[in-house]
Image (tube, rainbow, N blue to C red):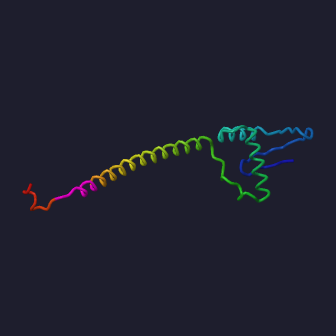
Amino acid sequence: MKYICKQFAIQIQYIIVNKTAKTFRLSQETLKQLKELSQLLGISETEVVSRAIHFYYISLKGEEKSIEGGPIVPFSEYKKAQEQLKQAIYKIGQLEGQLKVKEELIEELKQRIKELQGKQSRKWWQFWKI
């Protein structure tokens, strides 16, 4: 039997050895593609074949739209996105710190205003009286 996975362009022929074990024969070109995908995605060759069969099966059933998460992203892009996320979280922390400092200054000013309003003030003509 021959399967062609549209998403990974991998051709797989298999021969059933017994009911539990299977042997796969792949052409040199397909092996090259398999190694390339494995390196690109940062996963094992076995996992690449497994995902290819899974995606092909889903596409045959017409359930492509129900796949969550979208396309597979290379590990290098995942690490890059993680680093950008860490930087964004760090910047948010810095902004929260600055906001807290400003809120403390506003509270201090409000307290000073209350203190000044609490003191009894004299009218302007009463300043020369003791």
Specify the segment rendered in magenta: 113-121
- Kindly give the residue lying farthest to the right in the view shown: 18
Q: Name the quadrant containing residue 41.
A: top right
Residue drawn 47% across and 43% down? 90
Q: In front: 122, or 23? A: 122
The quadrant of the image that shows the C terminus is bottom left
Please tell me whether residue 117 belongs to the stretch shown in magenta: yes
Relative to 44, 100 lies left or right: left
Residue drawn 89% across and 39% down? 20
x then y, percent, for residue 30: 75, 41
Q: In front: 22, or 6? A: 22
Please tell me whether residue 40 belongs to the stretch shown in magenta: no
- Kindly give the residue lying farthest to the front in the view shown: 130
Relative to 80, 111 lies left or right: left
Q: What secondary structure characterizes most of the magenta part?
A: helix
Q: What count of labels does the image hold?
A: 0
Q: Name the quadrant containing residue 119.
A: bottom left
Whether residue 125 is situated above or below residue 46 in the rendered picture: below
Whether residue 1 is situated above or below residue 128 in the rendered picture: above
Whether residue 97 is situated above or below residue 117 in the rendered picture: above
Residue drawn 78% across and 47% down? 53
Q: In front: 19, or 114? A: 114
Q: Name the quadrant containing residue 50.
A: top right
x then y, percent, for residue 54: 77, 49
x then y, percent, for residue 13: 84, 43
Relative to 103, 86 lies left or right: right
